[in-house]
Amino acid sequence: MRDSYEALAGVVRPLGDAESWLPTGCTGWAVRDLMFHLLADARRALVALHTPAAAPPDRDAVTYWTHWAPNPVGAAHGRRHNRVAVSMFLDFGQLKEVCLETLAAAARAAGAAAPDRPVLTQGHVLTAGDLMLTLAVDATVHHLDLTVALPAAPGPAPAGLAAVRAPWTACWAARCRSTGATSTTLARPPDARP
């Protein structure tokens, strides 16, 4: 998580107001909107890393993602909430400063956390180590989203890209098992001939 957050900070730090209005890979969000979402994730990390759970983990770094299901209505409400909330920052520099401070604080908290300690987040219990992996995945994917219109921006951390591979591979395998498909049939367009 620390590497992923530091890589994100490397993208955010040089941004100015003009770049904050560029599009991202997230539908309907400009750079500033996605930065606010990343700020919320870093705040969630700080809260979760300081919220010990009494119950044993019910999710790990992979099942956190495999049990997630899209909710179009919730996603639309989330995008609108995010857009309205970020509009309260009248000066982009304020958003950038709080985003950088919070990313750094979350990275420090992750470094001090006992990886095997159960923590509570989003109604689930994970170990702190698994939570940090999920946050690294989220930060790395959004790093790629953030830089869609910023071709000179540095890329994501190699450790973050490695963290993305594990749940992606597990989700892909679960989909193959549930449908009887293979990686070849899932990759082939439905109207393509074998």
Image (spheres, rainbow, N blue to C red):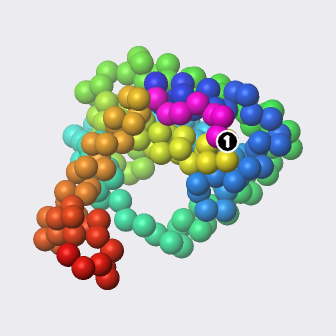
Query: Which SS type dominates the magenta stretch?
Result: loop
Horizontal side of residue 55 vs 32, given as left or right = left
Q: How many marks?
A: 1
Q: Nearer the viewer, residue 121 or 82?
A: 82
Q: Residue placed at 49% from the left, 39% from the top?
A: 139
- Where is mark 1, residue-wise? 150
Which residue is at the far right?
90
Horizontal side of residue 22 vs 5, given as left or right = right
Looking at the picture, does residue 174 appear above or below residue 140? below
| Residue 45 percent coordinates (x, y) | 48, 35
Quadrant the C terminus occupies: bottom left
Residue 50 appears in view: no
Which region of the structure is painted magenta? Answer: 151-157
Which residue is at the far front?
193
| Residue 23 percent coordinates (x, y) | 69, 53
Q: Residue placed at 34% from the left, 36% from the top?
A: 163
| Residue 191 percent coordinates (x, y) | 32, 82
Which residue is at the far bottom?
191
| Residue 44 percent coordinates (x, y) | 51, 40
Horizontal side of residue 154 vs 137, given as left or right = right
Residue 139 colored in magenta in the image: no
